[in-house]
Image (cartoon, rainbow, N blue to C red):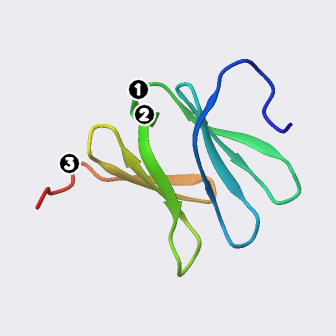
Amino acid sequence: MVIAGTTPIRGFAVARDGRIAAQAGDLLYQISASGVVTRVGKGAAWCIEYAEFEQVNERLVIHRCDKTLALVDGDSVARAREPAATW
């Protein structure tokens, strides 16, 4: 067990290098391949429909509940200001 607690894991994504992004309640965690757990964010802004690691640089792409995107690259988070277009 890497994340201790009673809150269920609602979603996760796995990178090729072994990193894992996991959502537990309103918290987003990133777990390194060596097992180090880092809290990426907390609260409504971190409500995630799904997450994925993009294929080129393995950055974490977060598809939020409010239809915006966030890109996590190391310690920085780039946020889209407008909701994603629905086609």
Where is residue 66 shown, x and y percent of the image? 27, 38
Given contact means CB atoms under 8 Å apart, are the residues at marks 1 and 2 in contact? yes
Q: Earlier in the sequence, mark 1 or mark 3?
A: 1
What crowding class fits label 3: few (fewer than 14 Cα within 10 Å), some (14-19), or many (20 or more)?
A: few
The residue labelled by disc 1 is: 44
**Residue 6's quadrant in the figure?**
top right
| Quadrant in the picture for the C terminus | bottom left
The residue labelled by disc 2 is: 47
Q: Residue at x 19, y 49 (%)?
A: 82
- Cα distance in 3D space between marks 1 and 2: 5 Å
Where is residue 71 shown, x and y percent of the image? 45, 58
- Cα distance in 3D space between marks 2 and 3: 14 Å
What crowding class fits label 1: few (fewer than 14 Cα within 10 Å), some (14-19), or many (20 or more)?
A: few
Where is residue 67 shown, x and y percent of the image? 26, 45
What crowding class fits label 2: few (fewer than 14 Cα within 10 Å), some (14-19), or many (20 or more)?
A: many
Q: Residue at x 56, y 25 (%)?
A: 25
Q: Earlier in the sequence, mark 2 or mark 3?
A: 2
**Residue 76's quadrant in the figure?**
bottom right
Residue 55 is marked as none
Residue 83 is marked as 3
In the picture, measured across the screen, residue 75 lies left or right of residue 36, that is left
Q: Residue at x 62, y 53 (%)?
A: 75
